[in-house]
Image (cartoon, rainbow, N blue to C red):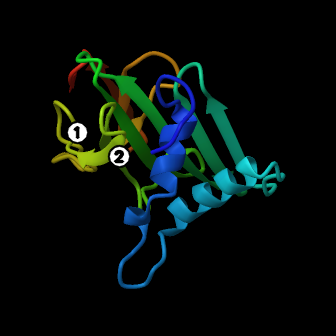
């Protein structure tokens, strides 16, 4: 991974993830639709080209957060990326989160999900890792869908439980420098 300065920014980490050949389907040589949408928006941004009318890309270098949104009349695709400095000061934890909504209600799509990668400062490589301190779940025993929202400021992840009766409940996964916990 190449970057300027003492350590990578959210833009560096996001582009490393988006441009990685590991994200291509080996059999078909293509990416999923949501990944392809954010990658194309990022390429347009890098080239100084305007985004499509339905697209919005927000990059907050200071807070280490990226939000890509595609919106139609009733549907919204949200893709978030952020990172945390780990307590050992030798690694960064990078997250990529996809969530789909219909009429402002969570309606998970085929590619929804939350994944984590660990960036090693010494090797300058980013590798997949399990969610630190918790299991990523997408449904509960009481039939709720589960969505995640990465922090646009701060360090904690918001977990929302979406019930069929339109009730929602939220919990916070708190970051301690090594892992998340409720």
Q: In this rendered view, identify the residue nearer to me: 119 or 138.
A: 119
Q: Is residue 119 above or below residue 50?
A: above
| 20 sits left or right of 132 in the view | right
Mark seen at residue 143: none
Using the image as rendered, state which of residue 13 and residue 177 is in the foreground: 13
| Location of mark 2 (residue) | 114
- One can see residue 106 in this view: no
> How far across and down, in percent of the image, does residue 84 sit?
37, 25
Categorize mark 2 by other alpha carbons within 10 Å: few (<14), some (14-19), many (20+). many
CB of mark 2 within 8 Å of CB of mark 1? yes
Q: Give the position of the N terminus as an image quadrant.
A: top left
Question: Under tag 2, what secondary structure?
Answer: strand
Numbered badge on residue 131: 1
Question: Looking at the picture, how far across and down is residue 155, in whole percent?
Answer: 39, 19
- Image-based side of 65 in relation to 181, left or right: right
Q: Distance between the residues labelled 2 and 1?
A: 9 Å
Residue under the point 23% across and 18% down? 88
């Amino acid at each position: 991974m190449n970057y300027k300065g003492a350590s990578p920014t959210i833009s560096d980490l996001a582009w490393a993830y988006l441009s990685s050949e590991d994200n291509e389907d080996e059999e078909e040589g293509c990416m999923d639709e949501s990944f392809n949408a954010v990658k194309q928006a990022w390429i347009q941004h890098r080239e100084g080209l305007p985004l499509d009318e339905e697209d919005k890309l927000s990059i907050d270098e200071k807070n280490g957060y990226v939000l890509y949104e595609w919106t139609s009349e009733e549907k919204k695709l949200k893709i978030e990326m952020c990172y945390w400095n780990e307590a050992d000061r030798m690694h960064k934890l990078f997250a990529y989160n996809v969530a789909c909504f219909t009429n402002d209600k969570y309606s998970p799509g085929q590619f929804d999900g939350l994944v984590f990668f660990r960036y090693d400062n010494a090797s300058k490589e980013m590798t997949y890792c399990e969610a630190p301190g918790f299991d990523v779940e997408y449904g509960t025993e009481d039939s709720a869908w589960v969505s995640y929202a990465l922090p646009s400021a701060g360090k904690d992840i918001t977990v929302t439980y979406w019930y069929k009766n339109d009730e929602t409940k939220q919990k916070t996964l708190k970051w301690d420098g090594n892992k998340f916990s409720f």
